[in-house]
Image (cartoon, rainbow, N blue to C red):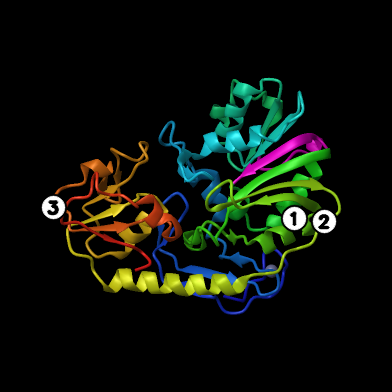
Amino acid sequence: MSAPSCRVCAASLGAADFDDPGPSLTSIRTVLDLPTRVWLCENCGHAQSPDLPELTDFYDTQYRISLDIDGHDQLYENAAGEQVFRTAYQAELVAGLDIPDGAKVLDFGAGKATTLQRLMAERSDLRPHVFDVSRDYTEHWAGWVPEDQQATYALPDGWTDRFDLITAHFVLEHVPDPVAILRELSRCLAPGGRLFLSVPDCGSNTGDLLVVDHLNHFTAASLTRAFTEAGLRIDSLDQASFAGAFIVVATGGTPGTVPARETGALRTVLGDWTAILHRLRTEAPAEPVAIYGAGFYGTLIATRIAGGPRCFLDRNPYLQGHDHMGAPVLTPEDCPADIASIVVGLNPARARTILADTSAWRPEGARLIWLDG
Ligand SMILES: [Zn+2]
């Protein structure tokens, strides 16, 4: 494979800075028999992973996030440290933007557009538009988004200079050419219109670096650089509202200054992950094993420990009662009494806070095993 170029600043990149033989995991917990590779760009501070094979097809026909389980949602942590459902919290953040009466709003990479639909429940004056790279979602748009306000595969020419607000919730991390997408969004903003965008912050939620369908792992520096390249100015870059994510509000106009790049910290983090994955493979926890968390981190652990877990423990009611990787997902209170090890599959930066008190449910003989030792 030839050396890749940076997806943000186009600088040539050398050898991968992280290279694990796999298996790899996608953001929707699909296990793929692929290596996990990450490159860091010393020029702009970006971190990136290679294109997935058959990438276009993956989003068109396989990326059915939230389609298979009705009402499925992801648990996130808000600024107050409370567990909240992602779409409700996104809608709350967007509602706080002081959107003008009758504004034309586009949800770009909308999926089912649950966030926009929630917003519309309070703001029926808004004129909703939706876009995605798949037609999987059209039945979810029918009835509340007029057909001429829906688009798939390409943003119509007629949408140039149209929108007072464009939202893109957790989209930009998936795209091979983020600057080209931002230019397209910039084209579709009305004069004075705003872009509200969220992406994972791989510095505060480091497992994001290992998510193979996240081709981009943005830092504050590379995110700002990408917006600048696209002719957009960031008005606010917020790392506090959403644990593990950047929330950006931008407008067209003269770009501001780009913060200093920060690859040193990410290089350390990638070294830590190499050590964590090695330990999971070589130091078997006492059996039977439960994994706390059936999301990305828990699934990653399950792919690495011999024999797999007896069960997962998870607070998300949409995951409970289903099997995952051949093991049941239980509420922590239903943890079997004979479990010897509970491997904590949560963001290592937050895990000890989230599980500060396990006295209400942890069986007496079960030892907690933290990813970071
Ligand atoms: Zn770069």
Residue appearing at x 61%, y 28% in the figure: 119
Which residue matches tag 1? 227
Where's ligand 1: which quadrant? Answer: bottom right
Seen from the viewer's position, the closer of residues 200 and 7 is 200
Mark 2, ligand 1, within 8 Å: the answer is no
Horizontal side, residue 352 vs residue 3: left or right: left
The residue indicated by pointer 3 is 338
Q: Nearer the viewer, residue 215 or 91?
A: 91
Residue depth check, mark 1 versus mark 2: number of the one nearer the observer = 2
Q: Secondary structure at mark 3?
A: loop
Residue 21 horizontal/vertical position (percent): 41, 71
Under mark 1, the amino acid is Phe
Q: Is residue 313 visible?
A: yes
**Which is nearer the N-term, disc 2 or disc 3?**
2
Q: Is residue 155 magenta?
A: yes
Image coords of residue 31 (percent x, y): 39, 56
User: Which mark sits nearer the N-terminus, 3 or 1?
Assistant: 1
Q: Residue 328's quadrant in the figure? A: top left
> Is the residue 66 above or below the residue 101 in the image?
below
Estimate how packed mark 3 is, as few (under 14), some (14 to 19) or many (20 or more) residues with alpha carbons within 10 Å.
Answer: few
> The residue under label 3 is which amino acid type?
Asp
The answer to whether the residue labelled 1 contacts the one labelled 2, judged by CB atoms less than 8 Å apart, is yes
| Residue for badge 2 | 255
Quarter of the image with the N terminus in it: bottom right
Q: Which residues are magenta?
A: 152-169
Q: In the rendered structure, which amino acid carries the disc numbered 2?
A: Pro
Instruction: Tell how many labels.
Output: 3
Left or right: residue 97 compared with residue 372: right
Marks 2 and 3 sit apart, C-alpha to C-alpha, by 59 Å
Q: Secondary structure at mark 2?
A: loop
